Amino acid sequence: MTDTTTATLNVANRPGTYLYALKGKQGDRQMYLLLVTNNVLLRNFAAEAEVADPERVQRSLDKRHAGDIVAYIVENPADYILGAMTYAIDNIDDEAFVPAAPGSNIGTLILPMDARLRCLDGQHRRHAIADAVHDDDEIGYDYSAVVLYVEDDYTKRRQMFSDMNATPKVVSKALNITFDSRDPYAQAAQQLRRSTRCSRESSRPRRRASTPPTRTSSPCPGSTTGSSATTSAWSCPGGAHPSGAASTS
């Protein structure tokens, strides 16, 4: 299988790693969206930049969490899904991005050979991909998304990490179980919920439809039979009105 991530556009001949990219900005910070095969990810976004860097801004690697992701990928090779990984790079000059057409934000990004990449988010996914590719080399030809920010200030990178981890809201366990169609325990819980709801609805007593009182024309109480003096009264015992007042002649 051929790895087609490396760009073949007509770009300047300069040393570096050539990657297709979408260029943009968030606030005043330059950013790039990269879509690379996992093989390219493992070659150019090294684990050392994430874990062994003495200035690392990531939290320590949780091997159990990374192992869970490996198992998820390997057990579901046809439909696994992983979110984009976020990195910061020290600096990229204007000539490092070559647009596909004049003024286009789609083109080729040339990563310098001496560029320092640091992982801001996705450390466990990156390690899990490496282990999954070791178990199944076909996974190396799948694609992963990388968001690359240009930021050389250590303090600002720390703030970026803090900002990204301050806003996400964890999905409730109940909602996750409701949407899970793979886990047998989740499916059992869904079936139990459906059967309980059906049982509750079938055992609920039915309400009798109440018949509203009908309005009829009847002789006034105390009037003589055959008298023309009639009143429109409610057919209630004693000719009482709904308001509680008895009708009078």
Image (cartoon, rainbow, N blue to C red):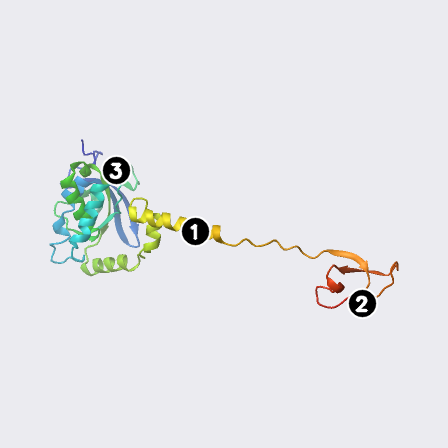
Mark 3 or mark 2: name the one nearer the start of the chain.
Answer: 3
- Can residue 90 be seen here? no
Closer to us: 17 or 197: 197
Do labels 2 and 1 touch, CB within 8 Å? Answer: no
* Quarter of the figure that contains the N terminus: top left
Cα separation, mark 3 vs mark 1, equals 34 Å
Mark 1, secondary structure of its residue: helix
Mark 3 or mark 1: name the one nearer the start of the chain.
Answer: 3
Cα separation, mark 2 vs mark 1, equals 53 Å
Residue at the spot x=18%, y=47% of the render? 128
> Height in image: 4 above or below 165?
above
> Height in image: 249 above or below 72?
below
Can you identify the residue that label 1 sits on?
197
Choose mark 3 or mark 2, whichever is in front.
Answer: 2
Closer to us: 172 or 127: 172
Can you identify the residue that label 2 sits on?
248
Q: Position of residue 129 (x, y in %)?
A: 18, 44
Residue at the spot x=45%, y=53% of the render? 200
> Height in image: 31 above or below 249?
above
Mark 2, secondary structure of its residue: loop
Choose mark 3 or mark 1, whichever is in front.
Answer: 1
Cα separation, mark 3 vs mark 2, equals 84 Å
Could you tell me the amino acid type at mark 1? Arg
Q: Position of residue 127 (x, y in %)?
A: 16, 48
Q: Residue furthest top?
A: 1
Could you tell me the amino acid type at mark 3? Ala
Could you tell me the amino acid type at mark 2? Thr
Mark 2 or mark 1: name the one nearer the start of the chain.
Answer: 1
Answer few, some or many: residues within 10 Å of disc 3's Cα (few below 14, many 20 plus, some between 14 and 19): few
Q: How many marks?
A: 3
Q: Is residue 82 left or right of residue 56?
A: right
Can you identify the residue that label 3 sits on?
78
